[in-house]
Amino acid sequence: MKKVNKFSINQPWAITIIYMIVGVNWIFFSDILINSIFSDDIQEMSRFQMIKGVLYVLLTGLLLYYLIKRLYDQISAGKRELELLFTNPNLGIFKVDEMGKFTYISPNILQIIGYSDQEVIGKSVIDFTPEEHLDQDLEKMLEIKENNPDRGFIINKYLKDKKGNTAIIKVYGIVLKDKKNNKTSYLAAFQNITEQERFLRSLESKNKKLQELASDQSHLVRAPLARILGIIELTQEVNLNPAEKNELIRHLKSSGEELDKALKDISRKMISN
């Protein structure tokens, strides 16, 4: 379904339409008024026509000032919001050409990879890719080029900072096209997600270690627990003499101590991990 543009005097086409309507109505109705008042006096009609022209320039000038100022204020407010947004050191924007070379990047990139925006401009995206992620990035870039240009893209991009460390940014990009609908460049917003990714990987690593620990230690818990349950069931179902009861109590104590040791060992390993 085709989207219908709502009328707003903050739109350039709306300003033009309002100016045309006011201009045409001024000319039409003012001429009718002059002809009705000065139909027989050519000199007075000529003088009033000059006054009418001056008033027209003044009124339309004020109208244009009001409309243009509204549009300018709206643009300025949007610009201030963007400036406020990108003062966040973890957020920014960049632009690359069809060859993948940076043509613009917000200055806060310095706080992420240690390079100033001037050091980045003109360099290829690949120039800042860690070697271990090079093939992956080349594959992503090829996929973006071959995708439908009307679709945006979201990728995780690895960057090598000035100290050789790896930073991770999430990129939200769109394709820019010229009047002939040809691709010209790519514009993207980015978010530094390095700390979030490290935290997630840390959680995944700990979860894996806990699973391995549970698997390794489960038999150490099951063995004494099974003996304890067996002894309890035996005492309930079999009539035992005092010597046999004492022997079972000794085994019960031994199994309880073994279970306690196993639980303490698991607890210690969980804390250390």
Image: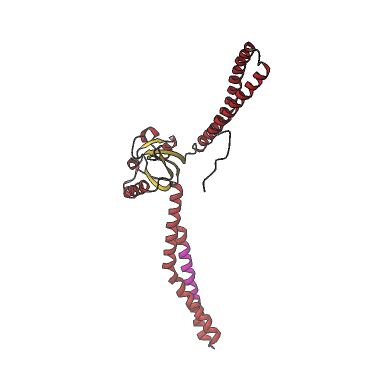
Q: Residue 31: name its quadrant.
A: top right
Image point (50%, 77%), residue name: 228
Say which of 207 and 68 sits in front: 68
Q: Main secondary structure of the magenta part?
A: helix
Can you see residue 197? yes
Q: Residue 47: name its quadrant.
A: top right
257 in relation to 146, above or below: below
Residue 165 locus on image (x, y percent):
37, 44
Can you see residue 273? no
Residue 72 included in the magenta stretch of the image? no
Marks counted in the figure total 0
Residue range corresponding to the magenta coloring = 253-267
Spot the residue most to the right. Answer: 37
Q: Residue 56: name its quadrant.
A: top right
Image point (58%, 22%), residue name: 61
Work out which quarter of the rendered image holds the C terminus and state it.
bottom left
Residue 261 included in the magenta stretch of the image? yes
53 in relation to 104, above or below: above
Residue 142 locus on image (x, y percent):
34, 47
Spot the residue most to the front. Answer: 40
Residue 238 locus on image (x, y percent):
53, 87
